[in-house]
Amino acid sequence: MKNKKYHLFDVVGIELEYMLVAQDTLKIAPKVDELFTLKCASIISDVENGNIAWSNELVAHVIEIKTNGPSSQLKELADDFHSNIKEINALLHQKKLQLMPTASHPFMDPLTETVLWKHNYSEVYELYNRIFNCKGHGWSNVQSMHINLPFYDESEFEQLHAAIRVLLPILPALTASSPILDGKITGFLDTRLEYYKNNQKKIPEMTGKVIPEQVFSSEEYHQKIFKPIQEAIYPYDTEKVLDHLFLNSRGAIARFDRNAIEIRVIDLQECPKADLAVAELVVESLKYMIAHLDLAELKSWHENELFSIFNQVISKGNEVILPDSFVSLFELEAEKVSVKQLWEFLYKKVVSKLSKDAQESILVMLNEGALAERILKVIRENPSEMKIKETYHQLSHCLAENQLFRP
């Protein structure tokens, strides 16, 4: 969202991360550079492909597919993303590879299989690796969707940041897709976020409590978030290659260079139809919150209170009972409200604003559970390697065909 300022919800930026795997075994394939060579006859860091762009990530088996700049056509983006996925899979077919969805590979061993990207920006990735040791699930085995939303000025930043902070803790109930690591059921619906909380604990200023602090102006943000990060990373950045302002790893990060907030707590789903349905619901829910809820009350919630809800949700998802005070923020007069019931409430408030595809997809998530829950319905009674592979082959087929996973 560079070079031009947009008002709230005028445009959106979407980023989706995918794994390259072998078609037969689903073993990870650190060959994104070979994919780029197939597409462009050279290894480059960004491939512009019409409305969509491709780029590398920290590790060599993950590709990011994203909107090629801000888009005002959120409801049409699922088809654009799916067209690019079909093109990528067609290229990868030559090497007997394919894309695989979800937020984590179910049996990757990051200690032995991690290969860092060795081309553009490799010096930055190497430094990250030296500081944090990126051969771990929280670094090399994660895929997510990022939603970038614009703000025009300080007032719009205040409103957007206040609403996003409150929505973050309940998002994983809808979008968790990482219930399996190392070939085992982890006990968390959103294991990616369980690792996300801790993977930068060596420099805790970078992630904080995942939920951003109560800061609602650019000056306050620089003083309370950016400045502590810059001071904490200084002794480690011996080559001076890190851009300190962009080390912020909270679940939503302010990008004042492009007047946007980037939401990062959403696990990748099984197909773009599902991902973009989530994006539509998030956008419309935030619109509703900003238009109808009390700004002072939204701002009043401390990150520790929100982090407590977040911690429960990444483990138990929809069944978590929310504090009455949190529920009352949404002007929902009821007691013992579950996260699922709150999402149903929000869905009813905004359903008329959603595309037909988004309505259908969100109803699957609400009625049949987040993708993690649907995966566990298939695997839980027989969590064998064969059953896990069979399920993730089905998920890869869902990605290829842009269909939701319905066990």
Image (cartoon, rainbow, N blue to C red):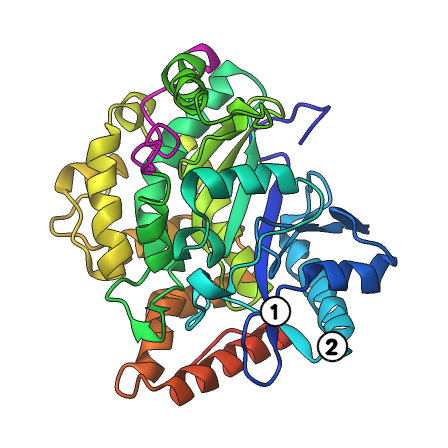
Main SS category, magenta section:
loop
Return the residue at label 2: 95
Quadrant in the picture for the C terminus = bottom left
Is residue 315 visible to the viewer in this orientation of the structure? yes
Q: Is residue 245 magenta?
A: no
Is residue 104 visible to the viewer in this orientation of the structure? no
In the image, 106: left or right of 382?
right
Position above or below: 36 against 233: below
Q: Is residue 204 magenta?
A: yes
Position above or below: 182 against 168: below
Q: How far is the residue under mark 2 from the one under mark 1?
A: 10 Å
Return the residue at label 1: 29
Q: Quadrant of residue 18?
A: bottom right
Q: Secondary structure at mark 2?
A: loop
Q: Residue at x 51, y 37 (%)?
A: 262
Residues in magenta?
201-219
Residue 260 in the image: state x and y as whole percent.
56, 29
Q: As shown in the figure, which amino acid type bears the numbered disc 1?
A: Ala
Of label 2 and label 1, which has the lower sequence position? 1
Residue 368 in the image: state x and y as whole percent.
35, 73
For this rendering, which residue is in front, 280 or 303? 303
In the image, 68: left or right of 211?
right
